[in-house]
Amino acid sequence: MMFATAHPAFRRNAYAPAGRALERFLSNAALESRQPAPQYKQDETAFHLSLDVPGIARDQLSISIEGAVVRISSREGAPRQYRVAYELPQDIEPTLSEAKLENGVLTLKLTKKIPVSNAAEITIQ
C-alpha cells in the first residue's frame, strides 16, 4: 500500500507510452476497416477506380503514378487524412490518365501503358 501511494507516477509513466501506441494502432485499424473498398473495373484500354473521399477538396488531394502503383493521399491541412496505394496488374500511362472529383467521389481513369517489345533479332553465323 505504501509503495502504491508513494510512487504512483513512476508506475504510470512506464506504461503510458505503450498504452497510447496501442490505442493509436487500434483507432487507425478501425478507421481503415470502415473505409469502403473502391469500385474497380477494367476494359481493354484502361482501369477505372471509384473511391469515396468525402470532405476533401480537389486541391487537397495528391495522386501519383509510378509504374503500376497508384498513390492517393490528402495534402497537409486537409480536414481528413487519407492515404492509400493500389498496385494494378499493368503499368499506367500517367499522361493519358484522368481524375475527377465530384460530390465526394474520386473517379480515376488510368490508361494502360502499351507494352513495347525490346526484342532484337540477331543473325546466325
Image (cartoon, rainbow, N blue to C red):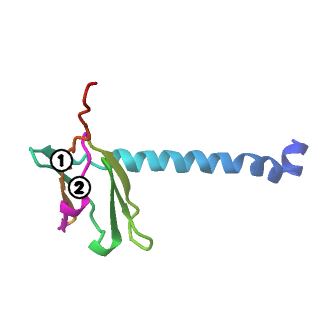
For the residue pair 73 and 6, the one nearer the viewer reads as 73
Seen in the image, is 6 located left or right of residue 113? right
Residue 48, x across and y down, in percent: 16, 51
In the drawing, does residue 15 fall left or right of residue 120?
right
At x 49% / y 45%, what residue is drawn?
26
Residue 33: say if magenta. Answer: no
**In the image, which disc is placed on residue 62?**
none
Label 1, on which residue? 114
**Are the residues tagged 2 and 1 within 8 Å (C-beta)?**
yes
Dot 1: what SS? loop
Q: Nearer the viewer, mark 2 or mark 1?
A: 1
Task: Give the residue type that dot 2 points to.
Answer: Glu
Asked whether 93 or 80 is in front, the reply is 93
At mark 2, the secondary structure is loop
Q: Which residues are magenta?
A: 89-103
Residue type indicated by callout 1:
Ile
Residue that mark 2 sits on: 93
Q: Residue at 55% x, 48% y: name it.
A: 23
Specify the quadrant of the image occupied by residue 44: top left
Q: Is residue 100 in the magenta section?
A: yes
Quadrant of image for the C terminus: top left
Label 2 to label 1: alpha-carbon separation: 8 Å
Q: Picture quarter containing residue 105?
A: bottom left
Residue 17 spot, x, y in % from top left:
68, 50
Q: Residue at x 32, y 49 (%)?
A: 67
